[in-house]
Amino acid sequence: MRFIKLFRIPLFALAFVLPTMIPALIIALVLRERAMTAAFGFTMLAAVVLCVPALVSIKKKPLRLYSRDGFFVVALSWVIVSLWGALPYFLSGAGVGWTDAVFESACGFATTGATTIADIEALPASLLFWRSVSHWTGGMGIILLTVALLPLLGVGGFQLIKAETPGPDKEKITPKITVTAKVLWAVYVALTLLVFVLYAAGGMSVFDAACHALTTLATGGVSTKNAGLGFYDSGYIDGVATVFMFLAGVNFNLYYKMARGKFREVTVNTELRAYVAVFIVAALVVAFDVWGRYGSFGAALRFAAFQTSSFLSTAGIAVTNYELWPPLSQAVLFLLMFLGGCSGSTAGGVKIVRYAALSKQAGNELRRMIYTRGVFSIKLNGKMGRKDVVYGVAAFVFLYGLLIALATLATAAAGFDILTSLSASLSILGNVGVGFGAIGPGGSYAIFPDAIKWLYSFLMITGRLELWTVLVLFQREYWRS
């Protein structure tokens, strides 16, 4: 009975995602896109019919959420919102089937820059905008939005954020979780507005600047152009995108700390330092490797930094055909798909902090072989780390690798080569979007059969929710306890 009552919360979350569709509806009305006006109108009406009873019910009988409830509620919220967000694609008249519509919607909310649509520019403008908005909404998080806007969930709000927020260690940056949520969203909105202004100053139309700003900060990577940002062939736009993709991959808590003048906490942050180091080293290695191809080191650095930032932040944007680059550069980009950005960011992937923790623990194990009676512990952010964090990180990395292996086998069983199978699995679970082989620059996920697309939709949501939130629901003990 309790799980039945908890169904109200996902509908509550849907109620707060509902207004994000209003701008797309307005665009459809202004541009007289009749099919899209009907599609958005029906989708929003369906949400209202579902959500009003849930909102009234929660208002009358608030629920106290426990830790175990958060997993169920968050996972179900993302599934329901993704299915609801698929309706405009399916009803658009653009020839998008239900499987592809769900895939596109899951890509949006999970901030995965993958697509099954060959001709993006043929889509109605309102649908393109909804595509970008769904990425932006999923970037900071559906539940985080819900908790920020209406604190009807009381003390249970933190249980939801813990189940959704990426990273092995969660923290409140303010005493109240609703205030924390609002602070993070304020930072997110401010950075989005800034990159919008910079894109518009670089020659983009207001519409294109808005769409690209939304997806850049969400590290979603989708575009209004078939060629993506490469359409503009602009060093300025590439530079802006490189910087903001990188910034979107940084823990948003650190921006708040910088605004409060807590620079010491930022400079000693282990994950940030590792993130910056990985970016610099990878970008320089690729730049020197492709130098001869572009004629000047400046041009080489431009494309190397862009693609490094894109793969590391899991934005998955391509402005050049990196599959024509030398093997070393391709190998660097491929390895970046295993990393991801920082915890608490909009980036996907394993997250840098987990590798930092494992590398420190590996060092401790080597020292233990020399000093057999020594007692060693890892140090993160200038403080001693807990052992349970290391255990959790090790388990996460194992499950992450296992899911990639299983997805690779499933894709290969569908008849695809090993590079495409492994690359697609890495890209989908890590919410990157692009990869190598058949899904390289200019490639499309339309080549995969429906069964694989459904598997990938599940993996995108699972990866966005850091595995545990979804996989724990498959444990018998969860339903028995």
Image: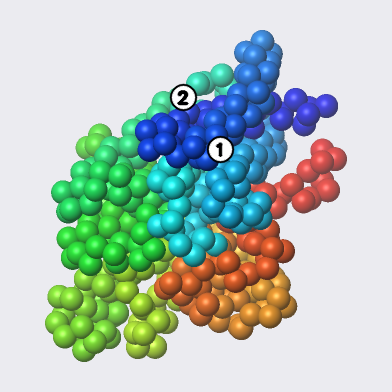
Q: Is residue 351 visible?
A: no
Q: Amino acid at mark 2?
A: Leu
Q: Identify the residue position indicated by label 1 in the image.
A: 39
The residue nearer to you, when weighing 409 against 97, is 97
Q: Residues within 10 Å of mark 2 (few under 14, many from 20)?
A: some
Residue 60 visible to the viewer: yes
131 left or right, relative to 252: right
User: Is 14 placed left or right of 202 in the picture?
Assistant: right
Query: For residue 140, what is the image quadrant?
Result: top left
* Residue in the image at 27% along x and 86% along y: 289
Q: Which residue is mark 2?
A: 149
Residue 171, above or below 428: above
- Residue drawn at x 30%, y 44% is 207
**342 sits to left or right of 289:** right
Query: Which one is in front in this view, the residue at disc 2 or the one at disc 1?
Result: 1
Q: Position of residue 479 (x, y in %)?
A: 82, 41
The N terminus - image quarter: top right
